[in-house]
Amino acid sequence: MAKIKGAVVIDKELCKGCGLCIVACPANVLGHSGEVNGKGYDYVKMVNPDACVGCASCGTVCPDSVITVYKVKI
């Protein structure tokens, strides 16, 4: 069976930093960046990218639909 590797792309300029995706991620892949975007929000980024399995829980709970999840078989 092929192993799945995921990648999360977040539009940092549209992210409000609400943190719902951080809580929804079962692999603890996401976290706050510690930086602010153009609107002054502490946006979310991948802090543990090797743990991502591409489950897309983060994208499902994002209220602004700024998250895209990609899956790759390795």
Image (cartoon, grey):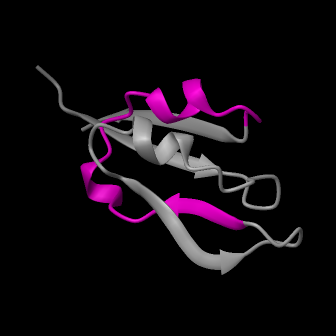
Question: Which residue is located at x 38 percent, y 33 percent?
Answer: 54
Q: Residue at x 38, y 39 (%)?
A: 25
Query: What is the quadrant of residue 36 in the picture?
Result: bottom right
The foreground one among 32 and 4 is: 32
Q: Is residue 39 above or below residue 62?
A: below
Residue 68 lies, in percent from the top left, at 62, 37
Left or right of residue 45: residue 72:
left
Viewer-nearest residue: 33 or 3: 33
In the depicted structure, whether residue 6 falls above or below residue 2: below
Boundaries of the magenta span: 42-65
Q: Is residue 44 magenta?
A: yes
Q: Furthest residue to the left?
A: 1
Say whether residue 64 is magenta: yes
Residue 37 is situated, as x and y percent measured from the top left of the image, at: 79, 72
Q: Quadrant of the N terminus?
A: top left
Is the C terminus in the top left, top right, bottom left or bottom right quadrant? Answer: top left
List x then y, in percent, for residue 32: 53, 66
Q: Is residue 2 above or below residue 18?
A: above
> How many numbered marks appear?
0
- Left or right of 16 on screen, residue 50: left
Find the residue positioned furthest to the right. 39
Left or right side of 73 for 21: right
Residue occupying image coordinates x 29% and y 37%? 26
| Residue displayed at 36% across by 52% down | 29
Q: Which residue lies most toward the bottom here?
A: 35
